[in-house]
Image: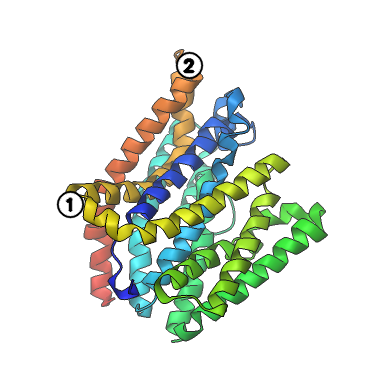
Amino acid sequence: MSPSHVKAIHGIDVLRFLAALIVMLFHLGYWIGVPTSTGGRITGGGFVLPWATGTLSLGKMGVETFFVISGFVIAYTAQNATMMSFLRSRVLRLVPAVWICGTITLAVALAIHDRTPEILWWAWIRSVLFFPLGEHIDGPYWTLPIECSFYFLVFILIALKAMNWFEQTFVLLAAASLVFCIWIFLVHPELSGQFWNPWFQIVLLVHGGEFAVGIFLWAILFKGLSTLRITGLAIGVAAGTLEIMNWMPRPEDQVWGVALWVISIFVIVASVRSNEAIDSWLSRKGRAVIRQVGLVTYPLYLLHELIGSVLMAGMAHVGVPLVACLGLAVLLLIGAAFLISRYGEPVLRKWLFVPIFDRLGV
């Protein structure tokens, strides 16, 4: 398949949604029972589903899947982009949802007195500006500066007209990430907390391997096999595997976590290979529905933890069983994310961001 004739890959849209869903189930079905978490702070840490420990705890793998998908998508997006067209595409994709979801989360947090108004306002400012350090308005926002660092690296390559070094750059990044993960996880496990050091996150030492996996999957699937691409993919998978193992609490969770992540990689491959057949089978309406499912992912990821915890706490307060609280909260959040992706984001793009870029000639 020629990279210049890539249709929307339906399987990746579905995989993206499923990744957001399992992250949400992790936060609202498992992590909410930890008193120090966002949900634990709001609910008092009493929301414990006994069966969730060994199942929903694996939902954190959705983040690793997001990074692989991001690497895959950006590898395609950047190929023929100019510096300004790449900047425009990333801003239009990322910023509207963050501004809308971050502001809704701020309003809810202020209403329930989750933190002091000063802390909340500063957390909101850091979140809508994608500032990498300090407290954000909600837990999931920690990944956005990492995504922006990845985009910035690609932006620099485009600006320097060095895209012919694109694959070599990400082999080196994957190798650096692998060395870092080996050093922390195998040589000095007592330093495992450094995986959460924001500086190591921002320079992509922690998650660089996962972005590289997406990039080399795209290169192999659309440009063909080469020694460089196979090497980059292998190093990226090794780095991602060690990173996942580092933050899984039990050996059995490590095995299942890595397996779930590897399965998501195979799903991407299968999605590309079968996309033409799926596309010919789907009706126009079916394609539109799947595309909308993919678009729901980003606002759902941003909205779910704090607001979902508030919804669950409110329902539990009036006697709704915990499992029903979780199910209803998930449905309400998906509905809210749909409204934002279908109406909120397009309006903000059309009336604010697009005119600004047009005036700047970008």
| Mark 1 crowd level (few <14, some 14–19, many ≥20, 10 Å Cα) | few
For the residues marked 1 and 2, what is the alpha-carbon distance in whole angstroms?
40 Å
- The residue at the point 74 percent across, 62 percent down is 182
Q: Mark 1: which amino acid?
A: Arg
> What secondary structure is found at the residue carrying circle 2?
loop
Q: Is residue 126 visible?
A: no
Q: Is residue 53 visible?
A: yes
The residue beneath circle 2 is 321
Q: Position of residue 298 (x, y in %)?
A: 39, 50
Q: Position of residue 343 (x, y in %)?
A: 24, 47
Which disc, if any, is residue 325?
A: none
Residue 104, image quadrant: top left
In-image side of 259 versus 355 (left or right): right
- The residue at the point 65 percent across, 72 percent down is 175
Above or below: residue 173 compared with residue 18 = below
Which disc, if any, is residue 284?
A: 1
> What secondary structure is found at the residue carrying circle 1?
helix
In-image side of 245 versus 148 (left or right): right
Which label's residue is closer to the chain start, 1 or 2?
1
Above or below: residue 338 compared with residue 125 = above
Q: Mark 2: which amino acid?
A: Pro
Quadrant containing the N terminus in the rendered view: bottom left
| Mark 2 crowd level (few <14, some 14–19, many ≥20, 10 Å Cα) | few
Residue 314, image quadrant: top left
Quadrant containing the C terminus in the rendered view: bottom left
Q: How is the image coloured?
A: rainbow
Q: Position of residue 6 (x, y in %)?
A: 30, 68
Q: Position of residue 97 (x, y in %)?
A: 36, 51
